[in-house]
Amino acid sequence: MLIKVKRGWEIPESAATAEAHFLNRRALLGGAAGLAAASLAGGAAAAVPGEGTGATRTADLYPAKRNAAYAIERPLTPESESADYNNFYEYGTNKTVTPASNALKAQPWTIKVDGLVEKPFEIGFEDLARKMALEERLYRHRCVEAWSMTVPWTGFPLAALVALARPTSGAKYIQMQTFLDKAMAPGQRSPFYPWPYTEGLTLAEANNDLAFMVTGVYGKPLLNQFGAPLRLAVPWKYGFKSVKSINRISFTAERPKTFWEGLQASEYGFWANVNPAVSHPRWSQASERVLGTDERIPTRIYNGYGEQVADLYKGLEKERLFA
Ligand SMILES: Nc1nc2c(c(=O)[nH]1)N[C@H]1C(S)=C(S)[C@@H](COP(=O)(O)O)O[C@H]1N2
Ligand SMILES: [Mo]
């Protein structure tokens, strides 16, 4: 886990093994590399893939009707590629998290909605999925590490969940968290991360049409490695904003501090909008490797979604919008 063996095809991107390198250094400085490695290796017993996901109970909702407004020019990334190349630190810091992620028990699953809302509540994942009108959208996804993919997510607009939550007038931000359970996620036994994984958006961003709560991909419920049973997709931002396996959504007056800010605020900020002209401190963001191909293509501002989202940032030019 901590010693990464590079394969040939990884080289263009290895300049950007951001998170892993940074964390390895911290672990070593802390003198706890061995401990972290040992705890990550000791994963919980594997379940049958797909079982324990939302699959068994919500499979009848798939495939959902594709919303043609979200078609894109690039071919879809084959599931065989995207389902075997994931970032999910709860299950390890390399891209092969699928075997370990079998330990994620995504059913039953409860989502807590709290903070500045008229009335805090909890809702079961299955109830939520059945309450919402699910649709399929083709989205680009651009990781801060300079790889990208194109996937058919199924889900519902985050704005519909905001409406269900009924935030009060003081609410300015929405914070989303991944579950916290060391027994279910061996990565969470490592003390070098500010668990649980936390992300956030402004309420205006959350209400933008593109902000999407994802329940499925490739025409079926999410497999564990994609962040079952419920994750976010905010395709104009770097991939780390798209938090997985969400079980708590809080409305706040203050800007929430995110997982990556907690680790390295100088490199991973709150806004994290994609911009090819603004380099990461340690590598260029000008282009991206397309998962499952030999291609490198130019990265686009807001990952190609500027028309839909650029207005959100008027008047915020002094903020660090692109990192
Ligand atoms: N809980 C959690 N959410 C997460 C991550 C993670 O490690 N843990 N990684 C993020 C990053 S860096 C990316 S690029 C995407 C990867 O999503 P994918 O594995 O479906 O491609 O998930 C994001 N959400
Ligand atoms: Mo990422």
Image (cartoon, helix red, strand yellow):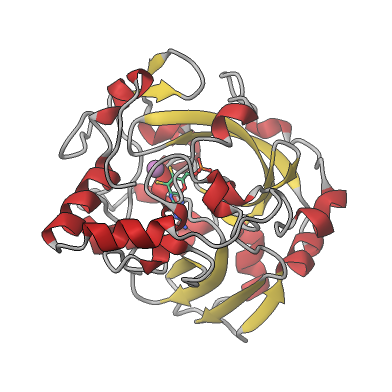
Query: Image quarter for residue 279?
Result: top left
Q: Nearer the viewer, residue 79 or 310?
A: 79
Q: Quadrant of ligand 2?
A: top left
x, y percent for residue 308: 50, 39
**Number of numbered labels in the structure image:** 0
x, y percent for residue 136: 72, 40
x, y percent for residue 256: 35, 69
Q: Residue at coordinates 54% horizontally, 67% vertically from top-left?
A: 184
Q: Nearer the viewer, residue 116 or 61?
A: 61
From this viewpoint, is residue 285 visible?
no
Query: Is 59 above or below relative to 137?
Result: below
Query: Is 48 above or below relative to 8?
Result: below
In the displayed structure image, the side of residue 260 where residue 207 appears, left or right: right
Query: Is 18 above or below relative to 151?
Result: below
Query: Is 164 above or below relative to 311?
Result: below
Q: Which residue lies furthest to the right in this view?
A: 60
Query: Image quarter for residue 199?
Result: bottom left
Q: Residue at coordinates 23% horizontally, 29% vertically from top-left?
A: 15
